[in-house]
Image (cartoon, rainbow, N blue to C red):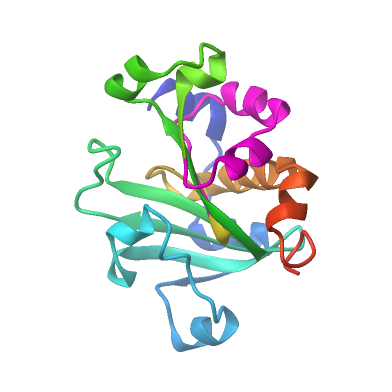
């Protein structure tokens, strides 16, 4: 087990159903008709990670509300993942809300992108940022959020677009999802008000 897993996720283990229950989520494993009725907008398939696969790649799916925000957690089992070829299977958490954010991705540098990076800050030396709209980069990535992300001890990849925030790491045992959910919620809370004022279409929690 890698150091970041030990440091971040901790050692407590429990069955997947218990994890879902502790988080207040409904565990269904794979999408069902009931899920489609409960979550009519489904998953954000336009985001870069999910666009590389399909519903057939989902497993360990659970959904519900976390601290008043609609969310889903799942495993995404890609055969290949071009941005992290050594870890194509991903443990994922997605929050949903009423907004129209342009697509923004924040991911650990590879050798090539790091060599081209001009930002010499700890955040800039760790993460590659890609945004279709320069305003979304400026408004979402506040100084406080940059510092906080720079201190994380795991290879988290973030994707923001439309009304969804997706975070994913190399696939982990399902009982270790709780801390990933909590981390994603902290990131959600740290998106600045100016960004919500510009791109939000409803209230901060689900409209």
Position in image of residue 14 (x %, y %): 53, 50
Which quadrant of the figure contains the N terminus? top left
Which residue is more in the foreground, 134 or 174?
134
Q: Is residue 26 left or right of residue 156?
A: right
Position in image of residue 140 (x %, y %): 65, 41
Q: Which residues are magenta?
A: 131-160
Identify which residue is drawn at 66% across, 26% down. Answer: 148
Q: Is residue 19 left or right of residue 170?
A: right
Identify which residue is drawn at 29% across, 39% down. Answer: 83
Relative to 28, say whether 14 is above or below. above
Identify which residue is drawn at 70% across, 42% down. Answer: 186
Relative to 143, say whether 76 is above or below. below
Position in image of residue 191 (x %, y %): 70, 43
Identify which residue is drawn at 54% across, 35% down. Answer: 9
Which residue is most to the top? 120
Which residue is more in the foreground, 127 or 15?
127
Position in image of residue 100 (x %, y %): 61, 62
Relative to 69, say whether 145 is above or below. above
Q: Is residue 184 left or right of residue 45?
A: right
- Residue 176 visible to an observer of this rendering: yes
Which residue is most to the left? 79
Confirm whether the magenta stretch covers residue 153.
Answer: yes
In which image quadrant can residue 67 be found?
bottom right
Confirm whether the magenta stretch covers residue 156.
Answer: yes
Which residue is more in the foreground, 130 or 34?
130
- Residue 18 visible to an observer of this rendering: no
Relative to 14, say whether 8 is above or below. above
Which residue is more in the foreground, 108 or 139?
139
Which residue is most to the front? 134
Image mark count:
0
Which quadrant of the figure contains the C terminus? bottom right
């Amino acid at each position: 087990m890698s150091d970041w897993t030990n440091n971040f996720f901790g050692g407590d283990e429990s069955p997947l159903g218990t994890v879902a229950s502790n988080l207040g989520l409904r565990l269904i494993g794979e999408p069902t008709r009931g899920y489609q009725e409960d979550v009519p907008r489904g998953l954000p398939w336009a985001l870069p990670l999910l666009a590389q696969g399909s519903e057939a790649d989902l497993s360990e799916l659970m959904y519900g509300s976390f601290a008043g925000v609609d969310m889903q957690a799942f495993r995404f089992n890609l055969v290949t993942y071009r941005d992290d070829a050594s870890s194509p299977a991903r443990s994922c958490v997605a929050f949903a809300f009423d907004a129209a954010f342009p697509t923004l991705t924040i991911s650990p540098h590879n050798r090539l992108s790091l060599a081209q990076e001009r930002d010499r800050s700890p955040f800039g030396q760790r993460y590659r940022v890609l945004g279709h709209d320069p305003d979304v980069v400026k408004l979402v990535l506040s100084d406080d959020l940059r510092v906080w992300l720079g201190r994380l001890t795991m290879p988290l990849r973030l994707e923001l677009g439309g009304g969804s925030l997706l975070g994913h790491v190399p696939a982990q045992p399902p009982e270790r999802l709780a801390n990933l959910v909590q981390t994603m919620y902290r990131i959600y809370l740290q998106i600045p008000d100016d960004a919500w004022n510009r791109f939000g279409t409803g209230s901060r929690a689900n409209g």
